[in-house]
Amino acid sequence: MPRKQPGALRAAQQRTPGRLFQPGMIHWLSLSVDAAIRRVEHESDGYTVFPGATAAALRRCHSFFGLPGRTLYPGLADCPCRGCPLDDVTLARDVLDDVLALLPPRAQAEPGRLVALIDRELFRRTLPDPRAPGHPWLREAWWRMRSYEGVIDPPQCGP
């Protein structure tokens, strides 16, 4: 019986599952970056990064900026757990930040430009929280230091 070469055995073990090569999951990004994001989501064991999280976060940011009005106020999520929809745009921005940190440097450029556009629009259309400088959340990300709709203290972060 013929024997397989060691290189062929290693190649078979390192194959990426076929579902990660389905084109066009994230319509704003190229297919190669889309595949890299899906690979990172599939291989990550992080709390906020799971399959489909990036696409859901981008859709949430897009729908948030589509709301009418000049000034927008992020609303609190009903439930910030991993499986729930990303109701809060700041949770969606956290997911995008986590995904960018996990991507290889070459694949970070395209989604990084998209996140920069989201940041610019989020900074322009939301208001800073006047109580933030005296709050223990000072070390948090800037997008969490915005005024929330009807909230006195910023939301608690993490699981």
Image (cartoon, grey):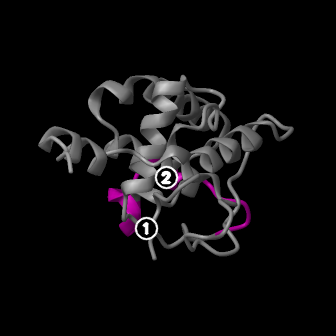
The residue closer to the viewer here, 151 or 55, is: 55
User: Which residue is farthest right?
Assistant: 68
Left or right of 158: which side holds 28?
right
The image's mark for residue 13 is none
User: Which residue is farthest left?
Assistant: 6
The residue closer to the viewer here, 8 or 77, is: 8
Q: Give the range drawn in magenta.
A: 134-151
Among numbered discs 1 and 2, the one appearing first in the sequence: 1
Can residue 93 be found in the magenta stretch? Answer: no
Left or right of 37: which side holds 71?
right
Residue at 55% over, 47% down: 19
Q: How crowded is mark 1: few (under 14 residues within 10 Å), some or many (20 or more)?
A: few
Give the amino acid type for the residue marked by disc 2 in the picture. Answer: Val
Q: Is 81 rendered above or below residue 123?
A: below
Residue at 53% over, 34% down: 119
Q: Is 38 rendered above or below residue 117?
A: below
Q: Would you name the residue on which mark 1 appears?
A: 47
Residue at 39% over, 45% down: 16
Left or right of 152: which side holds 96?
left
Q: Is mark 2 on a helix, strand or loop?
A: helix
Q: What element carries label 1?
A: loop
Can residue 142 be found in the magenta stretch? Answer: yes
Q: What is the x, y in percent for residue 67? A: 82, 41
Give the amino acid type for the residue marked by disc 1 in the picture. Answer: Tyr
Q: What is the x, y in percent for residue 66? A: 80, 36
The residue closer to the viewer here, 157 or 36, is: 36
Q: Is 102 rendered above or below residue 77?
A: above
Q: Is 111 rendered above or below residue 5?
A: above
The image's mark for residue 95 is 2
Q: What is the x, y in percent for residue 149? A: 72, 60
